[in-house]
Amino acid sequence: MIGVSAGYSQIHGIRNNAAANNFTMLSFLGQGSRSLMPPTLFAIFPIGKRLAVEPGFDLHRLQQAGPGSLTSTTSNIAARLDYAIHGGWYAAAGGDAQYVKITGTPAYARPGGVVAAGYRFGLSDELGGRIELSHTMFPARRTNPRFPAANVTGISLGLTVPLQ
């Protein structure tokens, strides 16, 4: 099954002045979530009655023209294991990798961990939906102090269709 998601995330940067590092973002397929938020494109591959592997992906390129022009490329690749609890309820845990390249700065990547819980439901014979609460933790980059550790808590809505 393949799916798309959109949602709301609260991002908490962890530094000495933590209150200055909190912000909220909305994500939509095609508009993007930027790299800290859960991927907007995902697939679910069952590997048993209750288990499934769920890879996720997101890629964005933002370019600002004019004086002081800036180009930012970000991507997010995630992989997690989903466990069906009962009915449509599930829990998931896995990893998340963030890649960032901004004009004038070295590219960097950092790993993160993610936990999630949600509910899957049918919308029609071929269309499914889900609502999910997730929490992702990214460590600080020692080589680039501009990127502190960050915790991302989000709620998302998703649509799924079977792969045939």
Image: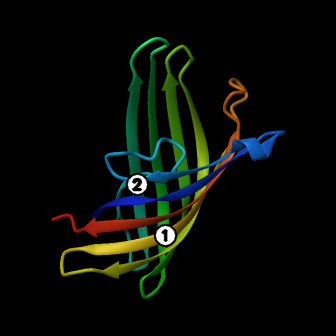
Residue 46 placement, left or right of 89? left
Tell me residue 20's x, y (percent). 74, 42
- Residue at the left extreme of this rendering: 164
**What numbered label is drawn on residue 71?**
none
Q: Which element carries disc 2, helix, strand or loop? A: strand
Looking at the image, residue 146 lies above or below residue 46? above
| Residue labelled with disc 1 | 132
Q: Residue at x 54, y 45 (%)?
A: 36
What amino acid is labelled 2 in the image? Answer: Pro
Looking at the image, residue 151 lies above or below residue 121? above
Precedes in sequence: disc 1 or disc 2? 2
Q: Quadrant of the C terminus?
A: bottom left
Between marks 1 and 2, how big is the CA–CA gap? 15 Å
The front one of 100 and 113 is 100
Tell me residue 56's x, y (percent). 40, 52
- Residue at the front extreme of this rendering: 67
- Residue at the bottom extreme of this rendering: 87
Q: Residue at x 39, y 73 (%)?
A: 130
Tell me residue 48's x, y (percent). 38, 74
Regarding residue 139, the answer to whether it shows in the image is: no
The front one of 134 and 91 is 134
Q: Which element carries disc 1, helix, strand or loop? A: strand
Q: Residue at x 54, y 13 (%)?
A: 104
Residue 29 placement, left or right of 81? left
The front one of 101 and 87 is 101
What amino acid is labelled 1 in the image? Answer: Glu
- Residue at the right extreme of this rendering: 16
User: Which of the two marks, 1 or 2, is nearer to us in this view?
Assistant: 1
| Residue labelled with disc 2 | 55
Q: Residues within 10 Å of mark 2 (few under 14, many from 20)?
A: many
Q: Residue at x 49, y 74 (%)?
A: 118
